[in-house]
């Protein structure tokens, strides 16, 4: 199987798993689910002729497509685990598969939905079941349950933010409604005391991924804001501002953003423009809170104003900008980069403490570190 074809199949399974996560968070009829199904159908049409059939085997945590193993990703593993949990070890697809049939598959992938007891075969989608009595006791279910609600929430909203921002970079309008829903779900998670902050800690093992970083910064900033007693519309605006703090990077050359190593002087000057580019974009976008414009512009200024962009000496940064800066630095240091390994949590904590009063707001940094200390003590 060619590399391009393999990547397309991986994207197909990513869309299905993301649609299932959205179905759990919202419902099967939610517009975001329909949008992802439409994209998945287009991919199938690009991969298969109408009369073509492909057999998909699920072996261990691997997907085998017509005897060709597909490289593992987070989404392919979750696809396999979810179907095995339903007692399915292989399925076949025909190129004429339709939206209703894909929705049936998504229903089987969803955790909190209740599909029929036995998967229903159709013209273009057929399932092969396994004898659950011979399955290692609880093996599939255990892996499912260990994928925490918090992790599902983060992965789902990260993928949703990626869809929204990718559309914006292609000159489509920014979905402010979608951003508000992401913030609402993070706040609901905090209200339910799921402690989704715990899900952020393992993410430093992954390579930097901008949308993961943005959702992490949003969740950290929201938790910090709630700790300070902030409520109501301001809290929601802070969440959107934190989500969009780095949106200016969408308008920088991709080769600079993805460069494996530190930028040179010329590239660094271009990167320093992203706060201005982000603010310029957001100020012209209907429905975006003014606070998001301010935070995009200020999040690299530093407490002592030695950062960028350069402003007058008596410039007063917004509270949200200070909080976003703290969360931004914390998550960036905890994440593996192409030119350095992720830093240990205790080392990051000490570094932030040293920056308090210079680059970081001292009181806000202190309250943030207290919150992180409390979360760290909850880790197994």
Image (cartoon, helix red, strand yellow):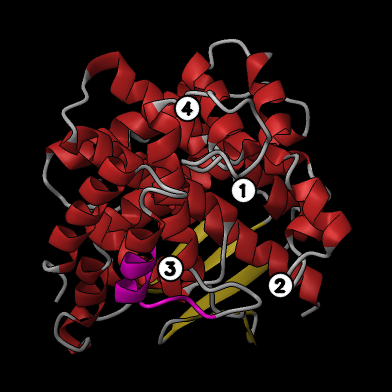
Q: Which circle, 3 or 2, is nearer the viewer?
A: 3
- Dots 2 and 1: beta carbons under 8 Å? no
- Dots 2 and 4: beta carbons under 8 Å? no
The span picked out in magenta is 341-351
Determine which of the numbered discs, if any, sits on residue 334 in the image.
3
* First along the sequence among labels 2 and 4: 2
Q: Distance from label 4 to label 3 (Cα)?
A: 25 Å
Identify the residue position indicated by label 2 in the image.
Answer: 6
Q: Is-magenta flag for residue 87?
A: no
Q: Nearer the viewer, residue 165 or 312?
A: 312
Determine which of the numbered discs, if any, sits on residue 172 in the image.
none
Determine which of the numbered discs, if any, sits on residue 40 in the image.
1
Asked if 321 appears above or below 45 in the picture, the reply is above
Callout 4 secondary element: loop
Determine which of the numbered discs, if any, sits on residue 317 in the image.
4
Q: Distance from label 2 to label 1 (Cα)?
A: 15 Å
């Amino acid at each position: 199987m060619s590399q391009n074809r393999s990547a397309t199949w991986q994207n197909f399974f990513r869309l299905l798993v993301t649609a299932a996560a959205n179905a759990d968070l919202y419902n099967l009829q939610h517009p975001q689910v329909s949008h992802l199904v439409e994209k998945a159908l287009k991919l199938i049409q690009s991969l298969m002729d109408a009369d073509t059939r492909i057999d998909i085997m699920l072996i261990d945590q691997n997907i085998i497509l017509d005897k060709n193993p597909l490289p593992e990703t987070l989404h392919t593993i979750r696809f396999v685990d979810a179907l095995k949990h339903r007692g399915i070890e292989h399925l076949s697809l025909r190129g004429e598969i339709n939206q209703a049939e894909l929705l049936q598959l998504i229903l089987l992938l969803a955790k909190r939905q209740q599909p029929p007891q036995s998967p229903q075969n159709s013209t273009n989608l057929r399932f092969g079941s396994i004898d659950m009595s011979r399955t290692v006791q609880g093996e599939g279910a255990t892996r499912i349950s260990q994928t925490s609600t918090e992790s599902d929430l983060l992965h789902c909203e990260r993928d949703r933010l990626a869809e929204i921002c990718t559309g914006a970079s292609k000159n489509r309008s920014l979905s402010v409604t979608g951003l508000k829903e992401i913030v609402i779900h993070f706040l609901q998670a905090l209200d339910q005391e799921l402690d989704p902050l715990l899900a952020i800690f393992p993410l430093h093992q992954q390579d930097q991924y901008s949308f993961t970083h943005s959702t992490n910064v949003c969740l950290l900033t929201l938790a910090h804001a709630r700790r300070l007693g902030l409520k109501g519309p301001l809290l929601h605006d802070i969440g959107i501002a934190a989500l969009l703090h780095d949106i200016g990077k969408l308008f920088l050359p991709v080769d600079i953003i993805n460069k494996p190593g530190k930028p040179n002087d010329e590239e660094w000057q271009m990167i320093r423009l992203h706060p201005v580019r982000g603010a310029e974009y957001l100020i012209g976008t209907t429905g975006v809170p003014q606070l998001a414009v301010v935070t995009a512009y200020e999040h690299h200024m530093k407490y002592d104003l030695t950062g960028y962009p350069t402003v007058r000496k008596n410039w007063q940064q917004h509270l949200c900008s200070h909080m976003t800066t703290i969360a931004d630095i914390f998550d960036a240091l905890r994440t593996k980069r192409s030119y350095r390994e992720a830093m240990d949590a205790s080392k990051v904590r000490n570094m932030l403490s040293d920056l308090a009063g210079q680059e970081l707001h001292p009181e806000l940094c202190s309250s943030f570190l207290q919150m992180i200390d409390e979360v760290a003590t909850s880790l197994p």
